[in-house]
Amino acid sequence: MNQEEELLNLFKNVNNFIPVLQALADSERLLILLKLFYAGPKGKNVTELSGKTRLSRPAISHHLKVLKAARIINSRKDGTQVYYSLDAKEKIAKIESLVNLLLQHLKIIDANQNEPLDDTALERMVAKARDMIKSA
């Protein structure tokens, strides 16, 4: 793959992970994820998650909504309670592949130091990637 194809592939993959990266970019959501990680497959409900924390139940519910929208957690209803559990093994593996793509792209940049991309070429490639994503 040439440098342009690699950049398009990288941009497309990073764009797919924006919701996940945004969901993980909050320390309160990370705390909730850790609580769910240690809860195992049974999970926890909002009351259990809000115990011993400074967050209100509505705040916890908001964070759970963000995590669920990013498909990092699952929910299941048990009577009147909703239990949340972690569904991140596959996501974490995909994030690892994304990091590997970034590292691979850095190697390509290092290998092409004699022919660096100028800002105009880079912006053209990013615009092309955005167009491809919109039309997909």
Image (tube, rainbow, N blue to C red):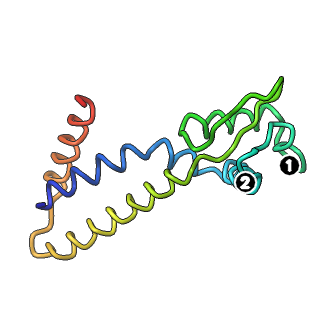
Give the mark nearest the N terminus, 2 or 1: 2
Residue 14: x percent and y percent? 36, 50
> Within 10 angstroms of label 2, few (less than 14), some, or many (20 or more) residues?
few
Residue 35 in picture, x, y percent from top left: 76, 53
Marks 2 & 1, CB-CB < 8 Å contact: yes
Give x and y (percent) for residue 132.
Answer: 21, 36
User: What's the residue at 89%, 46% (across, down)?
Assistant: 51
Residue picked out by circle 2: 31
Q: Amino acid at mark 2?
A: Leu
The amino acid at mark 1 is Thr
Q: Which residue is mark 1?
A: 53
Q: Would residue 75 appear left or right of 115 to someone viewing this image?
A: right
Residue at image coords 55%, 54%: 89
Q: Is residue 107 left or right of residue 117?
A: right
Q: Give the quadrant of the N terminus.
A: bottom left
Above or below, 77 against 26 in this view is above
Against 90, residue 100 (above or below) is below
96 vs 126: above or below: below
